[in-house]
Image: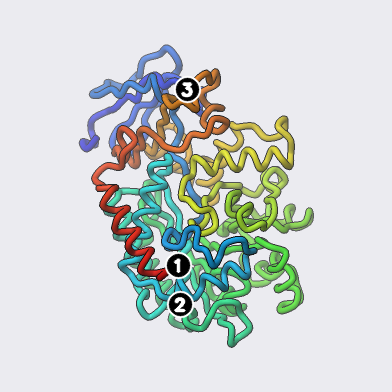
Amino acid sequence: MTDSSRTLWVRNPLACLDNEARGGVVIRGTRIIEKVAAGARPRAPIDEVFDASRHVLLPGLVNTHHHFYQTLTRAYSPALNKALFPWLTTLYDVWARLDEDQLGLASELAMVELLLSGCTTVADHHYVFSGKLTGAIDRQVETAERLGVRASLTRGSMSLGKEDGGLPPQSVVQDEASILADSERLIERYHQRGDGAMITVALAPCSPFSVSRELMRESARLARDKDVRLHTHLAETADETAYCVKLFGMRPLDYVEDCGWLSDRTWLAHGIHFNDDEIERLGQAGTGIAHCPSSNMVLGSGLCRTLELERAGAPVGIAVDGSASNDHSNLAEEMRQALLLGRLHYGPDQLSHETVLRWATQGSAACLGRSDIGGLEPGQQADLALFTLDEARFSGAENPLAALLLCGAHRADRVMVAGRWKVTNGEPCGVDLDALLHRHDAAARRLTS
């Protein structure tokens, strides 16, 4: 669809996450204008119809945490079979060699991967800045706009190198004045506000072990002044907790609260090692959690207490995390991991496929501070993911919605962002995927050789 006055009826899906839209949804321009009940016809005049009778209809999936650049160091032999801290120290020196062309290819591949998995809103946490990579976020904005995806891009930072007691090497840290000045520049230049925003910018010091207390506090102040969101890694490993207790004399959540971060402006990646009291405080504050099940398993970091967090009032979303700790950018597959890992802990009667689907849509949108995406309500953005069940893995499936997770859906047939098809017949629109894969693989080999 290109004409904002024309209406499209996505008609009679095989199944739908929203029972009130079993007859489909009607779209005009960038928005959903009507949900159609099963067996009914739209009230609005219809200009065009898409027959969705072979498709399971979902709101577009929303990713809440990623590191696009890490697509260049997947399954990297020197970093295999290591926990978080030694994994990071092995890879930091490789990532320090990144240039903007490599980052552009890594970002494009990650966004296309996410699109193909049904993801319409991508999020990235980029924190590696060197002399060759000062315009990293600008390059990501250009890529997202060219692909037509919705993007939450966070200006990450590392200011505390090994010489100052931090984990990263000095080659990838910046001084705090430069970090804050560039953060303000990016907000003023790119951050869009209101319903339908395609590009948003958040501030994201990397972690308690890579930035100073002053930078954490100043980032919180700038976020309040500019009315943008805050993001960081927190409570990912037991090592991190020990580090914070040793260096700051307090646990990770106490530390970020002391820095002014415990609020509904913030969402945190991983959120594994919280005790009962901390979960209650997160819920009271409305602080979101980006659940990264595959990464948590690959690095042996632990299990996020998703149900307790959500019951306490903390929004829970799903994230693929970096493609060097996953090692893919597939949000549909991540939903299945969230279901299986959650059931291992809570049991099958406590965690349903509907809950995980809600996390990947409505819950993830809440983490990003968005109410205009993540659902199929009239007035929300026309971001849709449609999956067919034509592969051998789905044969015999009686419940189409459950089959997406239990049978392992991994590729959407159709994806719409803001009323425009971005994936059709399982292929990205306007992207030469073979050429992209060739360029990306060559860039990865240059980086790691």
Determine contact: label 2, label 1, CB under 8 Å.
Answer: yes
What is the C-alpha distance between the residues marked 2 and 1? 9 Å
Provide the secondary structure element on which disc 2 rests: helix
Task: Say whether disc 1 or disc 3 marks the residue closer to the N-terminus.
Answer: 3
Residue at x 62%, y 72% (from the top left corner): 208
Determine contact: label 1, label 3, CB under 8 Å.
Answer: no
Outermost left residue = 3
* Residue where numbered disc 3 is placed: 15
At which x and y percent is residue 373?
Answer: 44, 42
Quarter assignment of residue 236: bottom right
* Residue where numbered disc 1 is placed: 155
Q: How packed is label 1: few (under 14 Cα within 10 Å), some, or many (20 or more)?
A: many
Three-letter amino acid code at disc 1?
Answer: Arg
* Residue where numbered disc 2 is placed: 179
Residue at x 37%, y 74% (from the top left corner): 133
What is the C-alpha distance between the residues marked 1 and 3? 38 Å
Task: Say whether disc 3 or disc 2 marks the residue closer to the N-terminus.
Answer: 3
- Using the image, determine if residue 379 lies above or below residue 226: above
Tell me, for residue 438, which label it has, or none: none
- Using the image, determine if residue 351 lies above or below residue 254: above
At which x and y percent is residue 241?
Answer: 72, 67
Q: How packed is label 3: few (under 14 Cα within 10 Å), some, or many (20 or more)?
A: many
Task: Say whether disc 2 or disc 1 marks the residue closer to the N-terminus.
Answer: 1
**Quadrant housing the C terminus:** bottom left
At which x and y percent is residue 345?
Answer: 73, 42
Residue at x 58%, y 58% (from the top left corner): 269
Provide the secondary structure element on which disc 3 rests: strand
Three-letter amino acid code at disc 3?
Answer: Ala
Horizontal relation, residue 301 to residue 187: left or right: right
Outermost top residue = 39
Horizontal relation, residue 101 to residue 206: left or right: left
